[in-house]
Structure formats: C-alpha cells, structure tokens
Image (cartoon, helix red, strand yellow):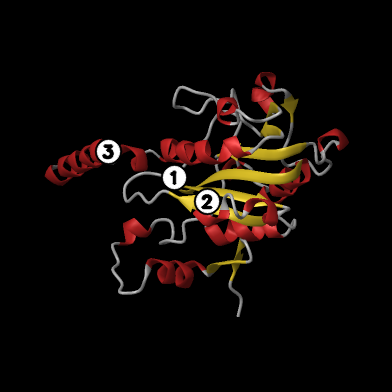
Amino acid sequence: MKSLRLGRFLVRLYRKFNNENFDARTWSNNVLKSIAPLVKGNVVNVSGGEDGDKNGSTYRQYFAQAASYAISNYGDASDSGDINLDLETSSLPQDLQEKFDAVFTHTVLEHVFDVDRAVTNLCAMSKDLVVTVVPFIQSFHHGPWYSDYWRFTPPALIRLFEKHSFKTVFMDWNDDPLGNVYIIHVATKYPERWWSIIGERCVVDNGPGWARTQITSADSKATRMASALGVRSSNGYFELITK
C-alpha cells in the first residue's frame, strides 16, 4: 500500500514539473503547430472526429495557411465529417485520389486492423504530404464502434510509407518514462521540397521509450539511436540501414 501511494505521488510530481512531456497529446500538438503552418494547399483530417485537439482548439486552426480544410469520418462518426471514408476500403473513390496536398491523421492508425490498406489509401489521397501521429506506448483504448489493434515503431512507419514511394522527412517522439509515448511522422513524395524546411529539425536521438529503460551508455545519443533502430539520415530523408 505504501509503495502504491509513493508511486502515485511520484507520478503527480512528474506531471507537475514535466507536464508538456507527460501529456503526449499536448506534446504532439506543439510539434504540429510548428509544421502545419508550412502547408498552403488542400488539407484533410482523416477520421478526425469533430477536429478537436483536446487542448481547447481545432486542428483546422493549426493549418491556418491551407487553401481548404476537410474532415473525413466513418461509421457512427460520419455525420460530423465532410467526407465519409472507410480507410480499409479496397476501392478509394476516384474523386479522393490525389485530391489533397496534405493528409493528416492523429492517433487513428492503431484503430484500423488492415493498417497497410489504410496507409495505401492515405498515400493515394495525397499529392505530396502525409502527416501522422501514432502511439508507440499507450494503454488499450476502444469505443462502441472501433477497437485497438496496433502500436508503431519508427522503422515500421518508414517502411509502411516507403512502399508507396513516400520518404520520411520528419520524425520525432516524446520521451516519457511514465505516460504515453507518441510518434509524429511526416512523409512526402517530394523530399527535396521539404528537407530544408523540416528535415534539418529531425531529432536523431534515443529511440522512443528510452527513458523507461534506465540504461546508460558512453555512446553518443545518435549512435544509440542508430544502433537500436537502424535509422539514419541520408539524402534528405530517413531510411532503414540494410546490410
């Protein structure tokens, strides 16, 4: 009982002094606020619900420079969106193919069983960018009409999008030893357009969840990152190291 009370006290203390990093949603929103204004074309928030960022704002406000902004939903949530879209469809409507300059999803892909098909459709909808936030560590969560299937690693995201000729130009994650850990990932058909803007700010650091391991090493952070995940920066994008 004493250990449980101590644990709860430590969690409250950590939240108080490190709230931004503890709350993965707040952390990912802050990163999005630095990326979204760079997008000036047509944007869609896929399976975006009512578009709320859970911090009192909407993601539409993040993409303030966008020429247009739409929201897709599916199932019981479809009434609150501009587009009714099943991410597992094998026949994406013709009018949605390459319709958007940027396709955005926040904590959606873990709820889609056929995640490869979902990524196929996200890429097919985009002329250029796909911006994705996914959980690396999060407790099981579901609702009346959706379940919870997956968690993602950086190499998995790279490979999922590389299959569709989208290169990863930005990837980052919060490093939280106690709460959820999210990964934000940006992939594009045209890395040369975005590397000078986004890629130089990519965090080549310890892998997600590193703070939980409590492992020390004399190696540089970048070396630990590369050796653990097999990821390196090259020619303006992230790629897997293959030997």
Q: Nearer the viewer, residue 30 or 242?
A: 30
Quarter placement of the N terminus: top left
- Proximity of marks 1 and 2: CB atoms separated by less than 8 Å: yes
What percent of the width, then of the height, locates residue 123?
73, 47
Q: Residue at x 68, y 51 (%)?
A: 193
Q: Nearer the viewer, residue 118 or 216?
A: 216
What percent of the width, then of the height, locates residue 202?
51, 55
Residue at mark 3 to residue at mark 1: CA–CA distance: 16 Å
The reply to whether residue 147 is visible in this rendering is no
**Residue at far right of view:** 94
Q: Amino acid at mark 2?
A: Arg
- Mark 1 crowdedness (10 Å alpha carbons): few <14, some 14-19, many ≥20: few
Residue matched to label 3: 15
Residue matched to label 1: 138
Q: Nearer the viewer, residue 236 or 60?
A: 236
Quarter placement of the C terminus: bottom right
Q: Residue at x 38, y 66 (%)?
A: 221
Q: Amino acid at mark 3?
A: Arg
What percent of the width, then of the height, locates residue 16?
24, 36
Residue matched to label 2: 151
- Mark 2 crowdedness (10 Å alpha carbons): few <14, some 14-19, many ≥20: some
Residue at mark 2 to residue at mark 3: CA–CA distance: 24 Å
Q: Amino acid at mark 1?
A: Gln
From the image, state whether disc 3 or disc 1 is nearer to you.
3
Horizontal relation, residue 77 to residue 92: left or right: left
The reply to whether residue 143 is visible in this rendering is yes
- Proximity of marks 3 and 1: CB atoms separated by less than 8 Å: no
